[in-house]
Amino acid sequence: MKNPIKDERILHMQQKIAGDAYSIAVILLFLSMLVKIYWMELPFAACFTELAVILICSVYVVTANLLGGSAGFESKKDSVKTYGLKSAAMGIVVSAPVSTVNYFRYPQNRENLFYFFISAAILFASAFLFSFLSLLSIGFVSKKRAEKIAKRLDEDEQKL
């Protein structure tokens, strides 16, 4: 047999292995960035290749899932409140470590805590707004794409 038929279990296992490999690679790239920036104290420009690979791979995965109609955003439970909670978590995840590092890295931040808290609040608000708008737009596009695919499948089914 030159072309054996693969059943769903084998395909699912291969996809899971590929997904796990992708996750491990992205985590290692992210850890490499953290080590370079915070432990080796290299400039951010030294991490350009890691950041570029992470961003390109992330854009590919999201785009491929959107075009396939299965981005995981078409749940009826996802509402503006859910997106707000997810965005708030993202804002905390982004602003807490960056603000903490900035507090210890720059001694002038310890003298005037008002500016420290203002910069942390601005960072939180920026991360919140960016993630909220991203989630809303991805959810909208994914829902429309899934509806289009379902409509096309229904039309094909009616033709048969």
Image (cartoon, rainbow, N blue to C red):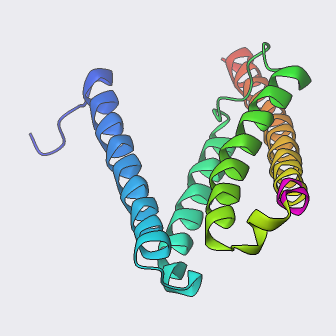
- Magenta stretch: residue 114 in it? yes
Q: Quadrant of residue 18?
A: top left
Looking at the picture, tell me which residue is in the foreground, 105 or 80. Answer: 105
Number of marks drawn: 0
**As drawn, which residue projects farthest toward the left?**
1
- Residue 115 in the image: x percent, y percent? 89, 62
Residues rendered magenta in the picture = 113-117
Q: Which residue is drawn at the image coordinates 59% and 64% (left, top)?
A: 55
Magenta residues, dominant SS class: helix
Q: Which residue is drawn at the image coordinates 84% and 57% (left, top)?
A: 113
Q: Which residue is drawn at the image coordinates 86% and 43% (left, top)?
A: 137
Q: Which residue is drawn at the image coordinates 78% and 13% (left, top)?
A: 77
Question: Is 12 left or right of 134, judged from the image as shown?
Answer: left
- Magenta stretch: residue 3 in it? no
Q: In this picture, is 33 found above or below 45?
A: above
Q: In this picture, is 28 found above or below 66?
A: below
- Residue 76 in the image: x percent, y percent? 79, 14
Looking at the picture, tell me which residue is in the foreground, 127 or 71. Answer: 127
- Residue 85 in the image: x percent, y percent? 80, 27
**As drawn, which residue projects farthest toward the front?**
111
Question: Is 32 left or right of 84, judged from the image as shown?
Answer: left
Q: In this picture, is 15 found above or below 123?
A: above
Question: Is 58 left or right of 119, judged from the image as shown?
Answer: left
What quarter of the picture does the N terminus occupy? top left
Looking at the picture, tell me which residue is in the foreground, 84 or 152. Answer: 84
- Residue 139 in the image: x percent, y percent? 80, 35
